[in-house]
């Protein structure tokens, strides 16, 4: 276990390391975004370099694409891939049914398209992302810039009729300017505190003109790999109804632990 990593980073690392065991030669692999996904991309890059693993990576953000190329993964577009064997990504929250909130990094749209186009979605996370009920993490929704303030008002009005505890909606900022996604859209963060009926909320929010997609991933994730700071991993598979525990052993390599910019 690398000693200079925080317990959270160790947890993210072991989850990532375990999850890449799902990747086999010849696969088309969806590459998620965020700090946990960045560990996974580094681990995959190591397998490419050391084992000669032959995969095609389909990135879910420009940052992920850059990192994947940097570590030697062959990157192709989703249009070239059409269908993927597996997508591996992080999450901001997961519940007992493996429903998720994603989009903390602003890449929810590409992440959802890629995960939905995959035979299997595997989420990698530390245990702090586990919740009984989704909603403590603000729910991101991607909206087109045209008329975004009107869209925000419509979202606020829609929330009045929904089973949620909070209703504050904020425009995500990047310093003093609105945040732009890779698709040129804005993000509204919905501070709901508790989402009572996530499936219904997801459907209703997506009906509002101007909303492109929301960060609720319902019935998309198949497996969550949960990492702990001491190297333990727990693998929850919703289709098999199984929970398995193991421990990840690894050696620190220069390749893997060189500066990580994500
Ligand atoms: C980006 C995401 C990320 O997967 C999510 O925010 C988790 O990030 P991290 O692994 O850095 O905690 O959805 O849009």
Image: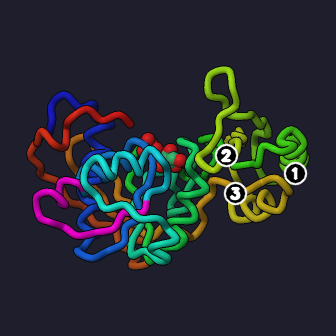
Residue density around tag 2, few if under 14, some if 14–19, many if 20 or more, within 10 Å: few
Q: CA distance from mark 3 to mark 2?
A: 13 Å
Mark 3 or mark 1: name the one nearer the start of the chain.
1
Q: Quadrant of the N terminus?
A: top left
Q: CA distance from mark 3 to mark 1?
A: 15 Å
Report which residue position mark 1 lands on.
158
Residue 226 drawn at (x, y percent): 35, 53
In the image, is 152 to the left or to the right of 28?
right
Q: Give the residue drawn at x 23%, y 70%.
A: 54
- Stretch of the chain drawn in magenta: 45-58
Disc sitting over residue 184 in the figure: 2
Report which residue position mark 3 lands on.
213
Whether the magenta-drawn stretch holds residue 50 is answered as yes
Q: Nearer the viewer, residue 173 or 22?
A: 173
Judged from the image, the secondary structure of the residue bearing numbered disc 1 is: helix
Q: Give the residue drawn at x 41%, y 49%.
A: 64
Task: Determine whether the beta carbon of the residue marked 2 sits less than 8 angstroms from the nearest atom of ligand 1.
Answer: no
Mark 3 or mark 2: name the one nearer the start of the chain.
2
| Labels 2, 1: front one | 2
């Amino acid at each position: 276990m690398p000693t200079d990593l925080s317990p959270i980073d160790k947890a993210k690392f072991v989850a990532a390391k375990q999850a890449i065991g799902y990747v086999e030669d010849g696969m088309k692999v969806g590459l998620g975004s965020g700090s946990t996904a960045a560990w996974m991309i580094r681990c995959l890059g190591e397998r490419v370099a050391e084992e000669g693993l032959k995969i095609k990576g389909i990135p879910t953000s420009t940052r992920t694409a850059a990192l994947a190329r940097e570590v030697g993964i062959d990157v192709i577009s989703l249009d070239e891939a059409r269908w993927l064997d597996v997508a591996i990504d992080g999450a901001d929250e997961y519940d007992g049914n493996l429903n998720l909130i994603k989009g903390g990094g602003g890449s929810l749209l590409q992440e959802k398209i890629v995960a939905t186009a995959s035979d299997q979605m595997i989420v990698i996370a530390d245990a702090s992302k586990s919740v009984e009920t989704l909603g403590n993490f603000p729910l991101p929704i991607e909206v087109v810039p045209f008329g975004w303030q009107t869209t925000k008002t419509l979202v606020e009005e829609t929330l009045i009729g929904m089973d949620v505890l909070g209703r504050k909606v904020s425009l995500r900022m990047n310093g003093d300017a609105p945040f732009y996604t890779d698709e040129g859209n804005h993000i509204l963060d919905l501070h709901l505190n508790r989402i009572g009926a996530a499936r219904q909320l997801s459907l209703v929010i997506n009906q509002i003109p101007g909303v492109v997609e929301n960060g609720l991933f319902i019935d998309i994730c198949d497996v969550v790999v949960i990492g702990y700071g001491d190297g333990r991993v727990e693998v929850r598979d919703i289709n098999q109804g199984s929970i398995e525990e193991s421990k990840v052993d690894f050696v620190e390599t220069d390749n893997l632990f060189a500066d990580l910019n994500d």
